[in-house]
Amino acid sequence: KIRAAVKHWIEFCQDCLAAPEQSPQAHDNGEMALLAGTLLRRIPFYSMLENDSLLRAGADLARVLFQRFFECESFSMSQNCRADRGYANALLKAIGGSETPQGVVLKMTLPVKCALDSQISDADAGEDVMSRLLKLSTDQSQNHPKSSAMNGQAVLRAMLRTHPGPFLEQQNLWTLFIDHVGGFDPDRQQRSVPQDCIQALAIFLEGRMDILGEQTDATGTFPEKVAENVVPILTGVLADEKNSPLKTFALASFGSLLPSDWKTIRERNRSLAFDCIDLVMAICRDENASAKLRKAAFKGLGDVCTNYFAIFKGTPESTAINDENKRVCHKVCECLEGELRSDVNGSSSMALYAFGNLVRIVNDISSLLLEPSTLEKFAALLL
């Protein structure tokens, strides 16, 4: 009886949202959309089989939500007015990606995932949801450069966080995404547009790390795309003094690169890998940078150490490469030691985080073990 009642609630929401006579801007529809998002989030679909009738009803509701969301955004852009956030907020609930007070990232609900996996497409445009969402986000960035809370961008970020797989697997989506992220001019005065784009990239790489861990993608080709498409964007942001607000996201992006990414970067251009690490350390040393930015830099440096040096675990290397890695280790230690001695902007906690990551990873690489004198200096600072 409970299942039947819940199924009726879902079908009722779907019928109300799909009613053709309702305007996309109707307030009642926005409220109904929020109810639909709550149902998709709260009902425990995770325990159901894919052919379950209740799950199918949830997937149908998710399809209608996406359809009405695009209609609402298209109507708002054509009329040059602000779109109602009811549909966007409903999708944000159902897609997930936000962090709870306990630090848990909400996963995508099963009905939304089933709807996306079934290749949702618009009957007229013939495009899947991901492509339409990317194009909508790009259009909104260009037409509303001063707005930092456009619905399309918010939904895109949630999708990138919880469901990055299609961007890893489909070249057309990746091309659209890189156009969206990299299609900005660093000299533009409206900083909200590039900030949204770099934030989207950081969120995508974080979501990718969550689903892959230390593995590579299924085809083994994605690290090549990271080296070719992503690294130039990130290094450009970190090297450009005008892009200070964007650097936090670029630093987080570097911290989310996987060992396979760093290995590919080294194979393509070894000096580039060292340049990337130097750029991160330069911000760590910059006493004129804000406390927030320096903390992000030390956090990024710690994550870079973990993933960069991981490529040398269990693999005997030549003397030349071992010497290179020792020099990198030494430079990182000098950077961290300087921060722990001065703590100019209160960034010592993140410097300790970076040092812990470095010690943990080099402990598994005999050729990179820190010298006793180095460990003694850090021990004295900590005590």
Image (cartoon, rainbow, N blue to C red):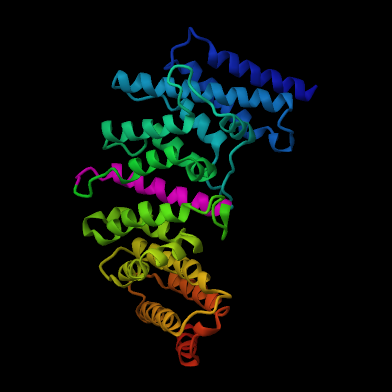
View extreme (top): residue:
21
Q: Is residue 193 magenta?
A: yes
In the displayed structure image, the side of residue 301 where residue 183 appears, left or right: left
Q: Which sits in the foreground, 210 or 104?
A: 210
Q: Is residue 103 visible?
A: no
Q: Is residue 321 visible?
A: yes
Horizontal and vertical percent position of residue 266 = 41, 67
View extreme (right): residue:
1
Residue 294 drawn above or below residue 164: below
Which residue is at 46% across, 30% downward? 88
Question: The N terminus appears in which quarter of the rendering?
Answer: top right
Which residue is at 31% across, 73% downward? 285
Q: Which sits in the foreground, 317 or 22?
A: 317
Which residue is at 42% across, 64% downward? 300
Q: What predominant SS class does the magenta segment belong to?
A: helix
Horizontal and vertical percent position of residue 148 = 33, 39
Q: Is residue 299 magenta?
A: no
Total tally of numbered discs in the picture: 0
Stretch of the chain drawn in magenta: 188-211
Snapshot quadrant of residue 15: top right
Horizontal and vertical percent position of residue 152 = 40, 32
Residue 320 drawn above or below residue 286: below
Horizontal and vertical percent position of residue 119 = 55, 29
